Amino acid sequence: WTRVSRLADHHGLAAVTDATLRAHTVPGVPTALLADLRTRRRARTINDLRLADRWREIHQTLDAHGIRVITLKGLHLVLSVYREIGLR
């Protein structure tokens, strides 16, 4: 499980790993690992919500000045692909 945790960190998949382990009954998952993954998932969600809020402010400001914006990746990808903002 230590290797799973390290790989999840390395690949930026702690939130997805947490969601997957919680969605399925996986025997033998250490409670400490689940707690750590949950903490990292919450931190990611908080950060992503802050970024989304900041992007909305920027978008509204540009829109108010008649500047059209096309979001190609980043936040657009998060909001269109993932079912939960913190899972990217």
Image (cartoon, grey):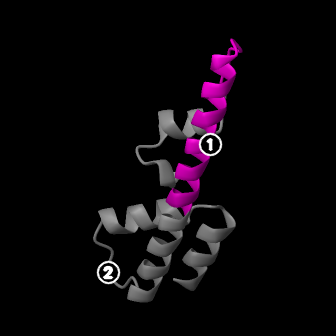
Q: Do the residues labelled 1 and 2 touch (CB within 8 Å)?
A: no
x, y percentage for residue 77? 57, 35
Q: Relative to 11, is 82 on the left or the right?
A: left
The spot of residue 67 in percent (x, y) is 71, 15
Which residue is label 2 attached to? 27
Q: What stretch is highlighted in magenta?
A: 44-71
> At 33% from the left edge and 74% from the top edge, which residue is drawn?
26
Relative height, residue 53 to residue 21 (above, below): above
**Does 64 appear in magenta?**
yes
Give the class, few, some or many, for how many residues have Cα within 10 Å of label 2's Cα (few <14, many ≥20): few
* Figure check: 8 above or below 33: above
Image coordinates of residue 14 in percent, x first then y, are 54, 66
Crowd class of label 1 (few under 14; some 14 to 19; many from 20; radius 10 Å): few
Q: Judge left or right: residue 34 versus residue 15.
A: left
Measured in 3D between alpha carbons, the distance from the residue under mark 1 to the one under mark 2, in whole angstroms, is 40 Å
Q: Which of 54 and 70 is in front in this view?
A: 54
Q: Amino acid under label 2?
A: Pro
Residue at 40% from the left image edge and 62% from the top image edge: 19
Specify the label residue 54 is tagged with. Answer: 1
**Quadrant hosting residue 59:** top right
Question: Which of 43/35 is in front?
Answer: 43
Q: Which of 22 and 77 is in front in this view?
A: 77
